[in-house]
Image (tube, coloured by chain):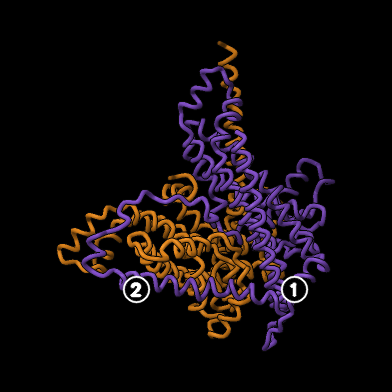
Amino acid sequence: MRRIVAARTVSRACRYALLGGHGLLVLFPMLWLLTTSLKDTWSIFKDPWKLPETLQWVNYSKAWISGGLGWKFWNSMVVDLVALTVILLVAAMAAYALARFKFPGNRVIYYLFLSGMALPVFLAIVPLFMLMTDLHLLNTRVGLITIYVAYMLSFPIFILYGFFKTLPGELAEAALIDGCTPFGVFWRVMLPLAKPGLVTAGIFVFIGLWNEYPLALVFLSKGELQTLPVGIASLTMTQRYQADWGALFAALTISVIPTVFFYTLFQRQIQAGLTAGAVKG
Amino acid sequence: MRRSDGNPIREAEPGGQKLPGLAYLHRPSRLIVLFLAPALLFYLVFYIYPMAKAMFLSFHRGSATSEEFVYVGTENFQKLLLHDSAFWTSLWHNLELVVVAGTVTLVLALALAMALTQTGRGRGFFRVIFLFPNVMPVVAAAILWSFVLNPSFGIVNGLLRQLKLESFCRAWLGEPQTALWAVMVIQIWAAVGFYVVLLYAGILNVPRQYTEAARLDGANGFQVFWHVTLPMLTEILRIAIIYIVIGSANTFALVFLVNEGEPRRHTEVLMTYLYEQAFRNGNFGYACSIGVMTLVFVIGLAATVNLLIRKESVEL
């Protein structure tokens, strides 16, 4: 009996060592980023392990104002929120039509949309670049938003398709009999019922948009319109020469905080949504 | 967060596939067209059409400045496969990312997920923080790690110096021997949380009576895992491997920002090479053929994985 108890204690210790060890590996670089962002460049070099002696909040104002991060933050907000709204609306409409109506080609269109999740992002980059040049949409916000809508439709369609499938048909019928137009059924009855799906899809799309780098690099590299990831990347290049490392660490912290905060707020939906494609069913 | 290869998709239960009321009373065809049109327009014009055109252009020679693309047959592919060592280096690195980093990611994720399911206190906390690296921008993760591994003020070398192990200090991302390994460490760090969540959900889905029956028959913890839990995770593991293949083929920001494939080509991957050919050298046609080969790489690997795992589950 005692041996069993001892074995249990050992296996428990191992479990916590594993979980705690990995937790530390995750958190430590992030905490180091945070503390280093409050140090001046001299002490960053002198002793990377030491905590800041006086908190250099000035790093943040330097990054935000003279580093131009405030502008990039604003640019990201504009592009991502517009794209998010369009994506959710367009995806909800398509998912509704695909999930609630039978018509020839239904399956084909559904799988065509889904295939968008598997193809390499850069496969089409050259033709897309030529297309955007021809349309005079290169280095414009409208151009990047358009590309984002096209590239990020698949996942919300997939999520919302599942939601619309499960909604009871009687509700729609009742609304129709009460004189609601088919469009009204979608807008007033079905869409509000699919709200949890919209939230899940919206969170994922937003995080994806906020973090997106390669497409923004190719299609919106012009300085004053750059989104945050591109801005941070180019700031890293320039600060390397000016060697204002404190401001750079502060800039990096600013770019990490929104998604980490947002994720912590919605982590339940995110954890559920992550496994939606693979586990459920 | 990219997902799915088309296969893992399970549909929700059909709640009302056909709505007689709708179909009969209000010709739905107009609504269907109206509702599908915007999504299809965006998707076909800015996604499918460029994909198709990339395949078309891969048989052409043309640059950023040239007006016309000249049909050259399979010239691009011949050059790529027979004379371009940079392409093979990149392809090899992508394969290493799948096989080496992918294996470590999955084994680590499996261990963490198992530990999570058996843990009472702190489970929620660990589940939340494990996903931090996945939700932060890849750009931020890449730059953060280039600082962590920085030869002069990074904490890794800092720690080695404290421990009087100065001889082990390296410019981890700058030296040919260590650069790719360092990239893989970052890749694993940034990816593993997602697979923990995926496998954790899968383990919770294994019916209790199976594991309990095995326990009653005298199996120890490891035997239960090996003979009961793991076989029941085959399907999820298959999906996880496909995600890893797709994710590795899309690796760009990490390598591009950490050192842009420097030291010379030692961390080059397919996407950074494609970017270089397209936007530094202006070889548009050639870049398209790299894209097509990447697609072939993804499809080939995914098909192999499907074949191997299907075989495996038949044997069980």
Query: Is residue A104 among what the camera can see?
Result: yes
Report which quarter residue B252 is drawn in. bottom right
**Which residue is labeled 2 in the image?**
B34
Q: Nearer the viewer, mark 1 or mark 2?
A: 1
**Which residue is labeled 1 in the image?**
B74
**Residue visible at 61% across and 63% down in the picture:** A120
Q: Chain of mark 2?
A: B
Secondary structure of the residue carrying numbered label 1: loop
Query: Is residue A206 among what the camera can see?
Result: no
Residue B58 location, x and y as percent? 68, 74
Report which quarter residue A87 is drawn in. bottom left
Question: What amino acid is at disc 1?
Answer: Thr
**Residue visible at 67% across and 72% down in the picture:** B288
Quadrant where the C terminus of chain A sits is top left
Out of B246 and B289, give the one closest to the viewer.
B289
**Residue visible at 51% across and 57% down in the picture:** A257
Question: What amino acid is at disc 2?
Answer: Leu
Residue B39 location, x and y as percent? 42, 70
Q: Which chain is orange?
A: A
The colour one sees for chain B in the rendered image is: purple
